[in-house]
Image: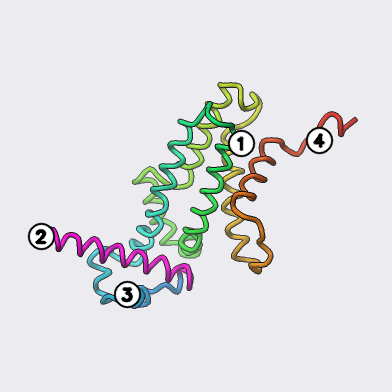
């Protein structure tokens, strides 16, 4: 019986998290009330407080579902140094970052518009050693390793290359919210390929073009 209760508890918690994700995506974080989430999850509003102290804690958990997987991906990226090509490894990571930022953007937007929520989010990042700087660190470490292998230019800045790639990924998902869907026609794979190519080649013209 105890096992069945534990499974039911886990199922309801997952059900609430999934419902919160859908409501946040559809209405935005500010309008995602616990009442609306409970209705979407088909449970009593009080059930939410059995698992989460308040709405902010629920939002942290929603973001955390995605953050954990993405941070793990960033942490394993350095292990790929020397394999495939630098461009291919970065393209796969950037495509994953686009999907990640698209999933958490409503929660991030809610945090930026709510000072208390933002402070809680910062404390959460500090306590769990997670957040955007962790992802930037993973990409930077990967690029430094590739630099030592001679596959990245000595004069390049791994940290700022990481910031540019992740920053571009996040801004792309914000852009998708600001313009009509018809204005966003590229696939994640093409976006990732062009972002990586631009960072790796830079904007400097080739010697032949300059001549």
Q: Which quarter of the picture shows residue 207?
A: top right
Closer-to-camera residue (188/102): 188
Mark 2–mark 4 Cα distance, whole angstroms, equals: 68 Å
The mark closer to the camera, 1 or 3, is 1
Q: Which residue is mark 4?
A: 205
Give the percent coordinates (x, y) of residue 34.
34, 73
Q: Is residue 78 found inside the magenta-colored segment of the image?
A: no
Q: Is residue 145 left or right of residue 3?
A: right
Q: Which residue is mark 3?
A: 38
Rendered residue at 67%/60% (across/down): 185
Q: Going by the picture, which residue comes out furthest to the left?
A: 1
Q: Magenta stretch?
A: 1-29
The mark closer to the camera, 3 or 2, is 2
Q: Secondary structure at mark 1?
A: helix
Q: Secondary structure at mark 4?
A: loop
Q: Is residue 80 left or right of residue 151?
A: left
Q: Is residue 9 found inside the magenta-colored segment of the image?
A: yes
Q: Which is nearer the N-term, disc 4 or disc 3?
A: 3
Mark 3 Cα-neighbour bin, 10 Å: few <14, some 14–19, many ≥20: many
Q: Which residue is mark 1?
A: 87
Rendered residue at 14%/62% (across/down): 4
Rendered residue at 63%/67% (across/down): 181
Which labelled disc corresponds to residue 2?
2
Query: Is disc 3 in contact with disc 2, using a CB cutoff of under 8 Å?
Result: no
Give the percent coordinates (x, y) of residue 106.
49, 63
Query: Is disc 4 in contact with disc 1, using a CB cutoff of under 8 Å?
Result: no
Q: Secondary structure at mark 3?
A: helix
What secondary structure is the stretch in magenta mostly built from?
A: helix
Q: Which is nearer the N-term, disc 3 or disc 2?
A: 2
Mark 3–mark 2 Cα distance, whole angstroms, equals: 25 Å
């Amino acid at each position: 019986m105890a096992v069945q209760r534990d499974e039911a508890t886990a199922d309801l918690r997952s059900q609430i998290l999934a419902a919160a994700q859908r409501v946040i995506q559809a209405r935005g974080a500010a309008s995602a009330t616990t009442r609306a989430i409970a209705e979407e999850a088909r449970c009593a509003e009080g059930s939410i407080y059995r698992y989460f102290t308040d709405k902010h804690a629920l939002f942290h958990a929603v973001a955390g579902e995605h953050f954990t997987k993405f941070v793990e991906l960033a942490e394993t990226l350095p292990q790929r140094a020397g394999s495939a090509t630098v461009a291919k490894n970065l393209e796969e990571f950037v495509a994953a970052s686009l999907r990640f930022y698209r999933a958490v953007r409503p929660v991030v937007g809610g945090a930026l518009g709510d000072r208390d929520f933002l402070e809680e989010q910062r404390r959460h990042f500090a306590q769990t050693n997670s957040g955007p700087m962790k992802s930037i660190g993973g990409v930077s470490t990967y690029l430094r390793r590739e630099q030592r292998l001679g596959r990245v230019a000595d004069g390049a800045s791994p940290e700022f290359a990481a910031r540019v790639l992740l920053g571009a990924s996040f801004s792309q998902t914000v852009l998708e919210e600001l313009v009509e869907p018809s204005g966003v026609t590229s696939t994640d794979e093409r976006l990732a390929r062009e972002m990586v190519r631009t960072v790796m080649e830079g904007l400097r013209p080739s010697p032949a073009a300059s001549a």
